[in-house]
Amino acid sequence: MLKNAFFTAGYRSVFFLACVSWLLAGCGSSSGSKSSDSHSSSSAHNSSVSSSSATSSTSSQGLSLLRAEGTHWVDSDGKPVVLKGTNLGNWLLQEFWMMGQSSDAVNDQCTLENVLDERFGFDERERLMQVFRNSWITERDWDLMQDFGLNVIRLPFIWNLLEDENNPWHLREDAWHYLDLAIAEAEARNMYVILDLHGAVGSQGWEHHSGCSDKNLYWTTPEYQQRTAWLWQEIARRYKDRDAIAGYGLLNEPWGTTPENLAVEMKKLYDAIREIDQRHIIILPGHSAGIHAYDNPADQGMTNVAMEMHFYPGIFGWGEIGYAVQRDWLRCGPTDNTGVCEWDERLQAVNTPFLIGEFQPWTGQGLESGAEITRATYDTYGEYGWAATNWSYKVITNSGGQGAGTWGMVTNQKDLGVLAKANTWACAGWKSTFAQACDAATDAFIAPGDGEQTWYLLIKAGSTPDGHLDVLFDKVSITHIASGEEKLSNGNFGSTASWTEWAHAGGVQARDYQYAASAIKLPGSDGDVLRLHGGKDVNAGVYQSVQLIGGEGYRLGGVFSDNGSHNAWAEIYLVSSEPEPGVDVTGLSVPQILFHSAPLADIENFFSSLATMEYDIHLPLMQAMTRAETSSLFDIPAAPAQVTLAEVAQGVQLGWQAVDDTHLSGYSVYRSSTPGTGYVRIASNITATAYLDTARAAGVTAYYVITAHKGMDESYFSQEVATAIAAIPLPGKVEAEHYASMAGIQAETTTDVGGGLNVGWMDSGDWFEYKVNIAEAGNYSIRYRVASETGSSGFSLLMAGQVIDSQTIPNTGGWQTWQTISATVTLPAGEHPLRFNVSGGSWNLNWFEVVKR
């Protein structure tokens, strides 16, 4: 239950906006308030303890010392404890994307510190860092974390928070201020703390979140390793009697070395800590390749330890954001032996507890569904006894608001500015309403100010210097909720009426107001749509003025789609000033600080503002995490069985056996032109056990799977059925994913011109084969569209078992940087199997083309 203190001025605004979304039947109110606690910049020095041998004087309040017992975290009575928490990212080690300030100029903490040193001197830099830290996390944040029902905080910090960087092997005078503060605030709310050395001296990886990007000097510098061991001994000496410490996280994501060397070096840190502290759990960090190099820690003389990994289904190349990837992870996949089941077996084998130190299940999922997926994730991890801390509690974004679900449990309140946006790096191939946009989304909003005012609705789209733009818009509207009055004109397009064109400096954008909707089937669209397209470095769009009444509620409507873009984006803005040619429109909810040139006062004011910035709290997430009932999500029905296919005059007739489940809500049909992958849903909410596909493309083999639905849950795919494999006519162009059979390869979305899929993930010994029909015997040119970041020994091409060509693959500059190579081959007439035998991995194929010479 939320405390009265929840409704500070900022929270009341959030609650009011939730009410005027007009989706809620009614809202309550509270008059309670609490001011946020922002410590003065001098408090750190006033409360510091300089003696490196001192131990913390404050005892834990009601928290039992945790220890490892088998695969469980247990308290002093041996009772298992399920740790459910979050990370306090960007507080004691800055990550600039988390506060809307990421740029090429300043993108890690080391760079910022160097810039501030050069401009203002070391002492002033340190003062500014205190202002930031005293503002990023305040008492309102600790109260909110308690309101989210958390019982553990993972606390990432950088080495120079404790060690004097100008006097190595010595602690700072204020070394313990922020760790002491965090532990005290946490234990006062009955929450444990995991101390996470997120950035070691020298950096343990190349990533910015090690504090200094592109360094990775820790593994090759004995002094850095020795200083880290010394630092952990000082930490252990300070907190060895503090029961609120759940564990010592030795190093975050130490991926700059091999798994084997990682295990060796972590054993050294373990031994260093055990000289001081024999009580607390020591957390051994996994490598990106896993935990195998540790073998069984007990066999290495390591006791009272836990293992740590970070899992991000749907993100960083692990499938796509959505229900399916989370279901496969949490329910062990269709074979029931992958996902969490596989990891449970590994942990049982080494008899060691587990910490999932980072995970992110709600971003981009929609608020309600993301909240339920998150609760189901925590529940599943808890069933195994795993500790889990999501990344991350707080994220400040340029556009503000929760949208479809940002990375933060709380983020900054949205101002009018960016109302909806999507881009190819967050959701390539998107096709959605503005209210379901993948990167930022808005359904309803309140116009600021009082009385009638002029605003400007801007449709803006662009591409990066190496990108390509092609996006579509339709049904754009702003309606007054109370009256239903439409405030925009010509939101269905078909002409230029009411729209003014705008462009920032850069590439040229073409605008087509009469693009045929049938070409892409934009959801809900009929007739013409707006197409914005162009090459690289585009930043332009169209706008019109709109009259809004301050304090009144409005609903944003519209649909938009990616139409084959590469490194491109599309955004909807509502701004108070008319867009000017050559002047960019950003609509940012937070100021952008150019740390190389901004006045000191601007930097300090921005840092200070973080303490009182109004929050948009993920209320559905809070409600899901604090309710008494566990999640019933991922109680998936069985997949339909006995699927049949018949090619009839009207199309493709499918049938299947009914799934025996009283809660079943229907079936979906998926189709692909590639076996085993690339399925697109073509029908849903089917209550019968048959479906006639009349839209199958002629001359292309069609592959089908069926799923069953039960509420939000969807079964795994049924067995695949396919139409007769059609021989591909040659000469002609063949899409790589249209193979007839294969072993070992996968298809993925391509950013090459034309879009679609490419095949990749190849290893030596893999193969893929096509059924082709050659019009006449003779000499042909064959062109291969390939990409590789490393180059490869490539492949051999076989016709009916005989090698007709072999190719090595050049380094094209990237996995999606495409190049065409060619050869001359002699082909026989008639139908034949055409097989690619993979000689060496690390390359992709988008298509090949056979041309008569």
Image (cartoon, grey):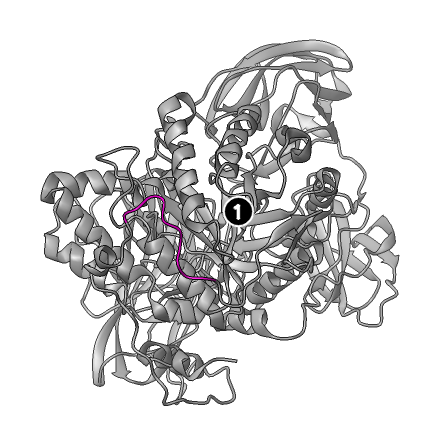
Counting labels gives 1
| Closer to us: 153 or 175 | 175
Q: Is residue 253 visible?
A: no
Identify the residue position indicated by label 1 in the image: 315
Q: Position of residue 431 (x, y in %)?
A: 51, 57
Tag 1 secondary structure: loop
Q: Residue at x 51, y 49 (%)?
A: 429
Vertical side of 588 occupied by 206: above or below: above
Q: Position of residue 312 (x, y in %)?
A: 55, 47
Q: Is residue 686 visible?
A: yes
Question: What is the chief secondary structure element of the magenta stretch?
Answer: loop
Q: Residue at x 28, y 37 (%)?
A: 170
Amino acid type of disc 1?
Ile
| Closer to us: 520 or 212 | 212
Q: Is residue 323 left or right of residue 659?
A: left
Quarter location, residue 662: bottom right
Quarter location, residue 677: top right
Q: Is residue 82 left or right of residue 601?
A: right
Q: Position of residue 500 (x, y in %)?
A: 24, 62
| Closer to us: 827 or 347 | 347
Vertical side of 767 occupied by 154: above or below: below
Q: Residues within 10 Å of mark 1 (few under 14, many from 20)?
A: some
Asked if residue 442 is among those painted magenta in the image, a careful observer would answer no
Q: Position of residue 22 (x, y in %)?
A: 46, 83
Q: Residue at x 57, y 69 (%)?
A: 625
Vertical side of 280 occupied by 413: above or below: below
Which range is magenta?
A: 50-59
Q: Residue at x 40, y 55 (%)?
A: 56
